[in-house]
Structures are given as C-alpha cells and as structure tokens.
Image: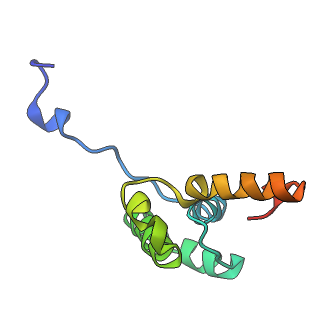
Amino acid sequence: MADKPLAEETKKPEAKSMSVPDMKQLAHDYAVPMSDGTLKSIAEDMTPAKASAFEDYLKTTAKGLYPTLAPQIEAGIKTAYLLDPYRQVGKQMLGEDLSLIS
C-alpha cells in the first residue's frame, strides 16, 4: 500500500448510470412508490451524477415517509430491510404470502 500514490488510495468508486429496472428496484428498496412513467422520464437523460442524486432523493423521501426509520435510513440501511420484520409478523399472523406486497 505504501508504493501506491495517495490519489489512488482515496479514489472513490466510479458512479454508474441507471436503467429503468435499476431505478425501479432502488425505489422498491427504499419503499418509495413511483410510477413507471415517472421513472422513464427520469431515465431519459440519466447520467452517473443524476443516478447518485436519484438515490439521495429516494433516501430523503423514505425518511419523510417513514420518520421513525429515518436514523437507520440515514445510516445507509435500505427501507425494505427495515420493513421486513413487519412483513414477517404480518405473514405469521395472517398466514399469507406477503412477499407479493411491495
């Protein structure tokens, strides 16, 4: 590690652009409902910088939708992971497959 220049050691991973399916999955991960039309419109001129801004938007929106989960979302845990225990309890109580509910 000592033989690498400092710039290489601190280099951030390169951001990548997103497709509509990628954006849809990310919105699902943060439990933020978005229409296909909106996602398609956003994706039309998607760049790596806009992809990062889109994820920031989803995090901010999720924190507003689920304020009790905001500290965990801020810490980097996706909303879908935080909501999973509630889905599991619902499944146990109702005896239904809640994996279909997004």
Q: Quadrant of residue 12?
A: top left
The one of 24 and 82 positioned closer to us in this rendering: 82
Could you tell me which quadrant the C terminus lies in?
A: bottom right
The one of 44 and 71 positioned closer to us in this rendering: 71
The one of 89 and 4 positioned closer to us in this rendering: 89
Residue 41 placement (x, y as % from top left)? 60, 80
Q: Is residue 22 visible in this depiction of the protein?
A: yes
Q: Going by the image, does 28 lie left or right of 72?
A: right
Residue 79 placement (x, y as % from top left)? 55, 60
Quick one: which residue is furthest to the right in this view? 95
Q: Going by the image, does 83 lie left or right of 100?
A: left
- Label count reads 0
Residue at point 56%, 63% (across, down):
30
Quick one: which residue is furthest to the front in this view? 93
The one of 90 and 75 positioned closer to us in this rendering: 90
Q: Quadrant of residue 99?
A: bottom right
Residue 57 against residue 96 in the figure, above or below: below
Q: Is residue 48 visible in this depiction of the protein?
A: no
Residue at point 58%, 52% (across, down):
81
Residue 94 placement (x, y as % from top left)? 87, 59
Figure colour scheme: rainbow
Residue at point 59%, 72% (across, down):
32
Residue 13 placement (x, y as % from top left)? 33, 43
Residue 73 against residue 37 in the figure, above or below: above
Residue 3 against residue 48 in the figure, above or below: above
Could you tell me which quadrant the N terminus lies in?
A: top left
Q: Quadrant of residue 10?
A: top left
Residue at point 87%, 54% (across, down):
97
